[in-house]
Image (spheres, helix red, strand yellow):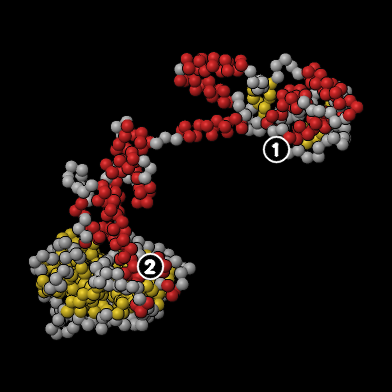
């Protein structure tokens, strides 16, 4: 510190003090020695014995900063005084004298009541009583304080403890925190039912996943009782069935759906039934995933027996039926369980190239340039739309809107008020070749053409938005969902696109001829081509630019003897149709002969 004498040999060269803004000095008489530290100076009296002076400096470097920082003199530091009083002299000629003089010197400087002033770096100066030697008075005073404390109200007790804590130093706060932490931990799951709040405890535990729920059952008997009486395993399965199509499909196929979504008044199995059911469901799911990866399937074949020309151009299915459009101008409806033909619809004068149905109607497009609407139950023709000049190659309808496309290069947008009240809203023109496929949602209409382009249109205004370029030859198929478009082309490739920016995210190569049909879900892409092969691709890996191209194709399925025209799939099966006049059902759930070792011969 400027203005002071040069430090002596007794001065410590370094002492870490953090941030300190005040100046503390050792009080004394006569010549002073100043010891500069970081923004802090100490003055030690020169009247002390040299050894006491050394011990004082040693003491300053060893005691906690919070003990002496802010003291106006060494005499005000109780800890320093105690140490100085007990320092033995190492100088033989005046050993006893030095100790007595040092003690007398301290006694002269000490006030009647010694206190410790502590200044924390982040708090105010606090004063605390020095710890007295252990005496009988302490126990009596403590009991008296406790007796007074017990007489106060809770608010007064809290205020007093807060005031008491505010006078303590940091390490005391740490001890109190360690003492309070276990006291503040509450077993609320056990406590809530005791207050008649079982439903709250059940609701809290109902958010756990299966592994956490298993662990919770092992906590104690009360937790196990809450889980059992709350039927939490049943609720967990119900949550999975509501949110995961795979779980929903399994519940329907294995007939345990009838035990779900029933209230407690209905007779249902106990919680233990659902507890044992859960791992069986997980095992089924793992088996299905393994079957997809390894190509294990049970194959069923429908021979369509077309009379004139052979080939099944389009199809759609549900749990009960398969509806197919054939090259021989007919529409055939098949029982999905028995595989028998239930009904044949006739009326088109050309091949049935595309179809879609819902619970009320079947809508078909044909090479005769017409769109027909059929009653799904009776098979009666309800409406015939004559607009396109050439073959209707594809169509889609949803929520009162229908979009058709044609070999005449145009796209027609229709309003469907009812099966018999369908009116043309807009014709979209822009492609330079046949429009082979369309798809749409509330935001975009997407079309693909033999001109090698994919065009995006606004659903609400029917205005053109952008063109996706990349395929080297005409595009035969696509599917659009959310931001993702997946397309297949006669350049033998599959491309993944981001519809918002128009970027091509990935090119999948593997088919040897035109990719004729393609579908995808959250996990997989399934494609069919004129090479007679069906390929299963890993969608998530395809969207990852770091994934090697060699890992993208999971399986190649070869059973068709002709071109694959159309396919659909779900979590359990693929259903495909071909130029060979067959419909194939590839079942990955019900495998004859149980688990079959995964053979690399299936891998592409």
Residue 337 in percent (x, y) is at 16, 69
Label 1 with label 2: CB-CB less than 8 Å: no
Q: Where is residue 147 in the image (x, y as percent from the top left)?
A: 50, 15
Relative to 62, is 386 above or below? below
Residue 363 percent location from the top left of the image? 18, 68
Looking at the image, is 72 positioned above or below residue 595? Answer: above
Does residue 215 lie above or below 561 as drawn? above
In terms of image quadrants, where is residue 342?
Answer: bottom left
- The answer to which of marks 1 and 2 sits earlier in the sequence is 1
Q: Which residue is drawn at 31% across and 82% down?
A: 531
The quarter of the image holding the C terminus is: bottom left
Q: Is mark 1 on a helix, strand or loop?
A: loop
Lateral position of residue 591 relative to residue 161, left or right:
left
Q: Distance between the residues labelled 1 and 2?
A: 57 Å
- Residue at position x 16%, y 65% from top? 320
Decide which of 68, 454 is in the foreground and name it.
Answer: 68
Horizontal side of residue 371 vs 521, given as left or right:
left
As drawn, is 270 to the left or to the right of 497?
left
437, 531: nearer the viewer: 531
Q: Which mark is residue 539?
A: 2
Quadrant location of the N terminus?
top right
232 relative position to 345: left or right: right
Which one is closest to the eye, mark 1 or mark 2?
A: 1
User: Does residue 510 appear in the picture of this structure?
Assistant: yes
Residue 504 vertical position relative to residue 234 in the rendered view, above or below? below
Q: Which residue is drawn at 36% across and 41% down?
A: 220
Q: Residue at x 44, y 74 (%)?
A: 549
Q: Name the residue under label 1.
A: 18
């Amino acid at each position: 510190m400027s203005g002071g004498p040069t430090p002596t040999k007794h001065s410590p060269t370094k002492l870490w003090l953090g941030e300190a803004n005040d100046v503390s000095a050792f009080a004394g008489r006569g010549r002073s020695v100043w010891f500069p530290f970081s923004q802090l100076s100490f003055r030690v009296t020169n009247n002390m014995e040299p050894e006491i002076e050394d011990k004082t400096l040693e003491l300053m470097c060893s005691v906690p900063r919070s003990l002496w920082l802010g003291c106006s003199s060494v005499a005000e530091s109780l800890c320093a005084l105690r140490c100085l009083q007990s320092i033995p002299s190492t100088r033989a000629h005046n050993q006893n004298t030095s100790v007595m003089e040092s003690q007398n010197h301290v006694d002269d400087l000490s006030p009647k009541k010694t206190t410790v002033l502590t200044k924390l770096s982040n708090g105010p100066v606090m004063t605390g009583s020095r710890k007295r030697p252990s005496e009988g008075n302490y126990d009596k005073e403590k009991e008296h304080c406790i007796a007074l404390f017990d007489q106060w109200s809770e608010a007064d007790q809290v205020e007093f403890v807060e005031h008491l804590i505010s006078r303590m130093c940091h390490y005391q706060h740490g001890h109190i925190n360690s003492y309070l932490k276990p006291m503040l931990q509450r077993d609320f799951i056990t406590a809530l039912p005791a207050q008649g709040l079982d439903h709250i405890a059940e609701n809290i535990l109902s958010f756990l996943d299966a592994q956490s729920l298993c662990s919770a059952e092992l906590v104690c008997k009360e937790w196990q009782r809450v889980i059992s009486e709350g039927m939490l395993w049943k609720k967990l399965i119900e949550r999975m069935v509501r949110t995961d199509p795979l779980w929903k499909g399994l519940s329907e196929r294995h007939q345990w759906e009838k035990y779900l979504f029933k209230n407690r008044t209905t007779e249902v199995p106990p919680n233990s039934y659902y507890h044992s059911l859960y791992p069986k469901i997980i095992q089924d799911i793992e088996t299905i995933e393994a079957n997809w990866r390894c190509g294990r399937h049970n194959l069923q074949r429908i021979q369509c027996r077309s009379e004139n020309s052979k080939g099944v151009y389009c199809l759609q299915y549900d749990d009960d039926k398969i509806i197919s459009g054939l090259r021989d101008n007919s529409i055939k409806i098949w029982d999905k369980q028995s595989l028998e033909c239930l009904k044949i619809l006739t009326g088109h004068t050309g091949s049935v190239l595309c179809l879609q149905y819902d619970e009320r109607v079947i809508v078909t497009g044909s090479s005769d340039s017409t769109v027909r609407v059929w009653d799904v139950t009776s098979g009666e023709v309800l409406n015939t739309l004559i607009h396109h000049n050439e073959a209707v190659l594809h169509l889609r309808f949803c929520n009162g809107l229908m979009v058709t496309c044609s070999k005449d290069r145009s796209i027609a947008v229709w309003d469907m008020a009812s099966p018999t009240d369908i009116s043309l809203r807009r014709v979209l023109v822009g492609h330079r070749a046949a429009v082979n496929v369309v798809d749409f949602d509330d935001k975009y209409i997407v079309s693909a053409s033999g001109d090698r382009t994919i065009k995006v249109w606004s659903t609400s205004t029917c205005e053109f938005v952008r063109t996706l370029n990349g395929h080297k030859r005409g595009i035969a198929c696509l599917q659009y969902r959310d931001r993702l478009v997946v397309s297949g082309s006669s350049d033998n490739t599959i491309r993944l696109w981001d519809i918002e920016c128009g970027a091509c995210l990935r090119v999948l190569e593997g088919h040897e001829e035109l990719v004729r049909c393609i579908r995808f879900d959250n996990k997989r892409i399934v494609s069919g081509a004129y090479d007679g092969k069906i390929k299963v691709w890993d969608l998530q890996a395809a969207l990852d630019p770091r994934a090697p191209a060699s890992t993208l194709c999971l399986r190649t399925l070869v059973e068709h003897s002709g071109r694959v025209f159309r396919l659909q799939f779900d979590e359990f099966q693929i259903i495909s149709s071909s130029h060979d006049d067959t419909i194939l059902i590839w079942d990955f759930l019900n495998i004859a002969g149980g688990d079959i070792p995964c053979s690399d011969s299936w891998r592409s």
